[in-house]
Amino acid sequence: MKQNEASITALVSAFSRAYHSQHDQPIIFNDYIAKDLLTEKEFSMISENMINGIQFFNKGIAERFKDQPEEILRWITQVQLSPTPLARAAFCEKVLLNEVNLGLEQYVILGAGFDTFCFRYPELENRVEVFEVDHPSSQEVKIKKISYAGLKKPDNLYFVPMDFTKKFSYQNLMENGFDKNKKAFFSLLGVSYYLTKEENSNLVKHLFANLPPGSSIVFDYADETLFKAKGISNRVENMVKMAAAGGEPMKSSFTNHEIQTMLEEAGLLIYEHLAPDAIQGRFFKGRTDYFSAFETINFVHAVKR
């Protein structure tokens, strides 16, 4: 990642949330702030790149909608870009809000990208401290975008610049007010794929080594079919290729047993696990558009014993 540049995956994820909020019904996850963190130029650039790349995604759709660019964009966002970012965000925030209602006071977003939680829940400003951890370059871009959008940073939001994929430091968090004696909730969304299995394992162990019982994490991961599955319209294969082309190659996938073992070694138990069929039933059932759960992606909520 270059200095003063945001992650490509963070930009595309924000685009998918912004597009969904403005164009799709029914709403799976309503990130109505995401559009404010993208300039008109960025939104148009991503839209045009996706439309112009339809031959890569699906030649049949390219021919079928060759004179309907908006329908091409709708197809790409609903089939390729949006299903996982929307469903995992909806899953995570439901768990998080339940934890807050039970008294949680600390939320750490690892790989925050253009997350907008604090801006969408101003009523929680005096109830939960939110720590956004991300690469310094991505975070610098986001801070500028918040200013350009005319948004006021909530008092309970703390930016913690860190390349946690290399080394996680609690010192950085504690300097911003994090308390290791209190329960914490972590989200690790859209990150595990880009770490090796060893890096994922070491990160989870380090996160929970000295935290009190009841602390927990929500994350998504790819199962063992990631590098061989095609998916609808080859979307799984396309996802892997796009990540590599964007300079952020996917590095890991897990069996259920490997995930359970990794979490148990870190002192965590799986409280809820959603495989693709369960994600389909919870977030996409009954839809009449192109949306469906990605074939290889799983969600987990795990709690420290």
Image: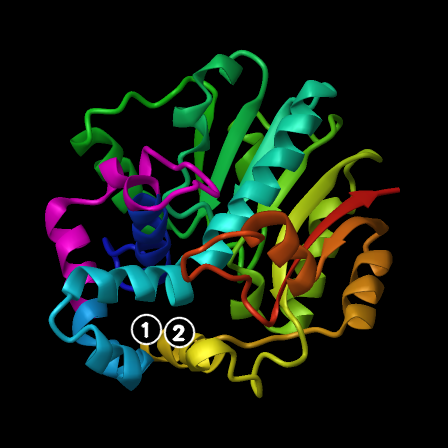
Judged left or right of residue 131, residue 46 is left
Q: Residue 246 carries which label?
A: 1
Quadrant in which residue 146 is drawn: top left
What segment carries the magenta color?
A: 21-49
- Nearer-the-camera pick, 232 or 52: 232
Judged left or right of residue 61, residue 103 is right
Residue 17 in the magenta stretch? The answer is: no
Tell me residue 97's x, y (percent): 62, 27
Residue 32 in the magenta stretch? The answer is: yes
**Image point 70% across, 53% down: which residue?**
300
To which residue does mark 2 refer? 243
Q: Quick one: label 2, few (<14), some, or many (20+) residues within 10 Å?
A: some
Kindly identify the amino acid type of the residue bearing the numbered disc 2.
Ala
Q: Which mark is residue 92?
A: none
Quadrant in which residue 79 is drawn: bottom left
- Nearer-the-camera pick, 254 or 74: 74
| C-alpha span from label 1 to label 2 | 5 Å
Q: What element carries label 2?
A: helix
